[in-house]
Structure formats: structure tokens, C-alpha cells
Amino acid sequence: MQWTCKQCNFSTEKRGQLLKHYRLKHGGFTRQQPIPCLHNDCLCTFKSFNALKVHLSVWHCQSNIGQASKPTVVFHCQLCEYTEPCTEEEFFTHLRRHLKLKQKVLCPYDGCDFHSNVYSTFNAHKSRVHKGSATTHFKTGIVSNIKHQDQLTEVENDISSQDDTECEFEESVGDIQDLESQLERNLAALFLKMQTILHISESATQEVIQQINQIHLLSQPLLHSKVQEIISQHCGDVDNSIVSDVVNAVSQTNVLLKFTSTGGSLSTASRRASYIQQEFPLVMPVEFRLDRDSSVVYVPTLKMLQALLRNKDILDKALHVECGASPEGYHSFRDGSHFKENVLLNVEEFRIALGLYIDDFEVANPLGTSKKKHKLCAVYWVLANLDSKYRSALHSIQLALLCKVKTVKEHGYAEVLRPLIQDLVTLEEHGVYVEQLAESVKGTVLYVAADNLGAHALAGFQESFAAHLFCRFCMCKKDDIQDKEVRSGLHQPRTRADHDRHVQEVIHDHTMARHLGVKRGCPLNENLKHFHVVDGFPPDILHDFLEGIVPAEMSLCLQDFMTKKYVSLDCLNKAIKQFPYVLR
């Protein structure tokens, strides 16, 4: 195989020689001129040679051939000259490269006429229709047995030659520089973790760095004495300048001191922030000022989506198609009627479904003089495509917007949520570009989770719950719930047409709000084509069930148990007192 440099006319038969050529001839890459992948059909670029080598080993490596699990079959691609002894997974990795180039790929399994040029659609078809299929199920001409061991030996020798060249390449001085850069990055990641995960303040971090540097300076005489002692034991008396040179060399290899001492890239808070912003996939928040005293801080949702889906592990989990509903019940939101009726999301192609969450919280003592003075409104989002066990994790929940509750009351949700809504409209109409799929993926908001007060405030319903039609799910009247059973099917549900009509009635006559339970339109509903308040604000299980129905029912049950002498009050109080609320 001939390898050609994408920057010049250099050509070679060995991939390792091409890597060495990139290092020697094109070693001056900057962030504006990233290093391209060596494979012509791969669109990936990299900031460092280490990143390139990791990519080659993961995506373009045949090093599994000749090891303990040698492939026993040869796969033949129907679109190119690819004919390699490899595993089934490696063959599908090759087919996905054609999909990334928008080439139509036929399903390789026997008896299946499915074809597609969309990466996510092809993956969904394979997962749903051919899950658990073996190599014996492929069409004729795609798989053949390895008849000659010479075929493997030739491949193994070629790989061994490439590995030898790459090993020689890795021993160069340039790798020392790469190692130094990687250690600098790891140290910056440690400082970032101290702040974001361990919640150590910036001032405390700076104090720790200064104290460590001070301790190092004070320990120099001890280091000098120990080095001189060791050199004297092995080499006799030596000049003191040699000892000083050795001590300086040892000190310079201390990564912590090198990058955090005066003038180092991580020596101050501003230098650390600048380095992290350049080297890490960081999405910076943007402040939108509404007037002189009010502002909204917004974390760009589209940029965050791109950063998340750039992670192969997250993308693979998002592309995974969940199983359909069984007669026993529902497995996920995909089994519900609202999802199935959403024409944007309910398609075979990969679509992004977002779940929003809005809530107000206090950052000061809510019982003192600061009550409501510093109360904040926060909007979060989660990638609903992920399985529930992943999206329920704290690190999967992303902050979208933050402002004071006072700002919401003065300017309204439409103005406060404007930057978020603009991104959501773009996501619906144009999508967000996903680098791994080499295409733009559309999506929309699937639901908004909130407590009843927050849901009614954002959706435009009466927040006092004193309206004649007080419920956001049905047309149940306030008087009806006093003497009628409240359950599904007994009351007429709110429909999209009814709600839109009610909003128009309230706009023309504000006095109708107290009767209809609707006082204004929802900004999400007014701007998004595939979202509606009637089915977009589901009940919140925490507030309605765990903090509502369950405590009420439990208290009634306990009262009945004590009345019937099943349990005494003293016994109940003793059990409550001895219950291990905190696991140790």
C-alpha cells in the first residue's frame, strides 16, 4: 500500500515512515494547522502527534491480526478494494467510513435488501434487525475462509515492520516534548478537577501551589547534599559545579514546579484559565444584559452538544436504539404516544431529543434578611437519547441558563430564554454538525421537567391553582374534584387546539384567565414547531408522588394500623429513631 503525505508530495510504502516524515518535515503545526489523519478516507484532525497515534491505533490498526485471536475469515468490501482478514466488528468499522463519506452501503447480511448512506440509520438497522448475527449469515462474496497461512504471515510481517519503524520514531527527542506537553495537560486537568469536582476554591489552589514551591526552595540544600553524597560514593570527589548541574536537572524534571513556578504556564489563576480554555473542549458561558441592572448568563447549547457528541462513547450510547415496549409496560419515552406522534423525532435517522429542567433556588439563607434577594432561576438540559441510567447521573445534566428570579418577573420568560430558544430553533431547522457522523443532526425539546409552580409559570398557566380550570392536563373544574373521583378517563383532556384557542381568548380578554387557567402563551410553544405545552410538561414524580401522594397515604395507613392496635406509637417512634438514614 502506498502512503502519501497530505501536505507535500512525499510517498512511502510504510506507515511508520510517513509518521516520521510528518514529525521531521511538518513538526511546526499550530492549532490553526492541525495534523490530518494519514488515511485519505478519514476526515479527523489532531492537535498533537500523540493524539494522532492513539487515533491510528484505535481506528486504523490491524495489530490484532496474528495475536491469540486471529481472524479465520477474509472480508471483501463491495464498494472498494478492501480485502482483509479481520473481525466482523472491524469490517463494519470499514463500512461506516463509506457512510461518513455519504456513500450508499448495502446491508451485508444474506436475504436483506436494506441500504442507506446515513451513518445512524445503518447502525439502527443493524442493531434492530441483525442483532446477534454471525459471519455465516453474510451474503455470498463478502466472506471467505483463509486458505493459506502465507496470507497472514505477509500481513504480520508488514505490521511488524511498521511497528519497528514506529518504535524507532517514538524514541526521538520529539516524544520527550510530547510527554512534557501531556504532563502539562494532566497537571492542568488536576487543577480543573480540584475546582469543579472537589470544590476547592481558586484562592486555596493558588495557596497550595505557592506553599509547595516554597517548600521546594527550602529543600534545595538537602537535595544538593544528598546528590553530592551519592556521586562521591561512586565517583569520588567531583567539582561542586557538576553537583549543582545535576541538582538543577533533577529540579527541572519536577513537572509541578516547572509549570507552576513564576512565569510558568499554570503559575497563576489567569494563566491556568487561559491554558484550560485553549487546550480543553471548554464551552464558555455568555452574558446577555437585558438592562443596566439585569442580565442572563447562557451556556451555548449547540456548542455543548457538539462537544458532548464529539466523545465517541457518548455518541455510541446516544445512537443505541432502545427496545420497543412489551405487553408488560413501557421501557422508555420512545414507547409513549407523544414521542410516536412527534414527526421530527420518531424516524429511523438519528435525532437529538432534549429534556429541559427549570427550577428556582436560594443561594442565601431563605429565612433571614436575604430571603428572595439572591434567589436564582436555572434551566438545565439533558440528552434524552441516553439510557436513563446514564442521563440520571449528575455529570450528564448540563446547565443552560442562569439568572435572578427578579429578572424573570421583570422581563418575562420570552426575553430571558431568548438565547436558548434561538439555539433550539436552529436545532430544529438546521441541526447541529456532529463531527463523528460528518453530518448535521436535527432535534428538538421532548419535554420540560419542573415542579407544578415552575411548569405553570413557564407554560403560561395560572400559578395560584385557583382558576376554574386549574389543571394543565385536563378540563377538570375546581368544584368537580370535591365530589368526583380523579383518575384518567373521567375528565376531558386539554388538547392542542383547545389550548391555542384559550391563549387567543386570554389575549383579547384578560379576565378569562381566571376561568380558563391560561394567562399567556409559552415562549417554547410559540417558537418551536415540534413542541407543545399540552404534552411537553409531564407531571413531576418527585413532587407529585414521593413528596405528595406517598407521604399522605403512608400517614393514613400508619394511623389505621395504630387504631387497630397492629403497632403502637412508641414502637413506631422507636423504629423511626433507630432507622439507618445514613449508610456508613
Image (cartoon, rainbow, N blue to C red):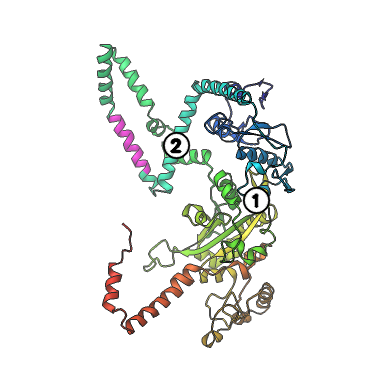
Res. 8 visible in picture: yes
Determine whether 99 is above or below 166 in the image: below
Picture layout, residue 3 above or below residue 318: above
Give the Cα distance between marks 2 and 1: 37 Å
For badge 1, the amino acid type reads: Ala
Q: Residue at x 38, y 26 (%)?
A: 252
What's the amino acid at mark 2?
Answer: Asn
Identify residue for label 2: 186
Magenta stretch containing residue 215, yes or no?
A: yes
Estimate the x, y position of residue 189 in percent, counting from the top left: 45, 40
> Which region is colored magenta?
205-218
User: Could you tell whether 203 is left or right of 317 in the image?
Assistant: left
378 and 185: which one is in front?
185
Residue sticking out furthest to the front: 147
Few, some or many residues within 10 Å of mark 2 (<14, 14–19, 20+): few
Does the magenta run of residues contain 23? no
From the viewer's perspective, is the residue at label 2 or at label 1 nearer?
1
**Residue 250 percent across, percent down from the top left:** 35, 24
Which corner quadrant of the image does residue 12 belong to? top right
Quarter occupied by the C terminus: bottom left
Name the residue tied to disc 1: 124
* Residue depicted at x 68% and y 54%: 348
Residue 502 percent across, percent down from the top left: 66, 77
Using the image, determine if residue 172 lies above or below residue 515. Answer: above
Q: Earlier in the sequence, mark 2 or mark 1?
A: 1
**In this view of the protein, which residue sits in the foreground, 220 or 124?**
124
**Left or right: where 561 falls relative to 306:** left
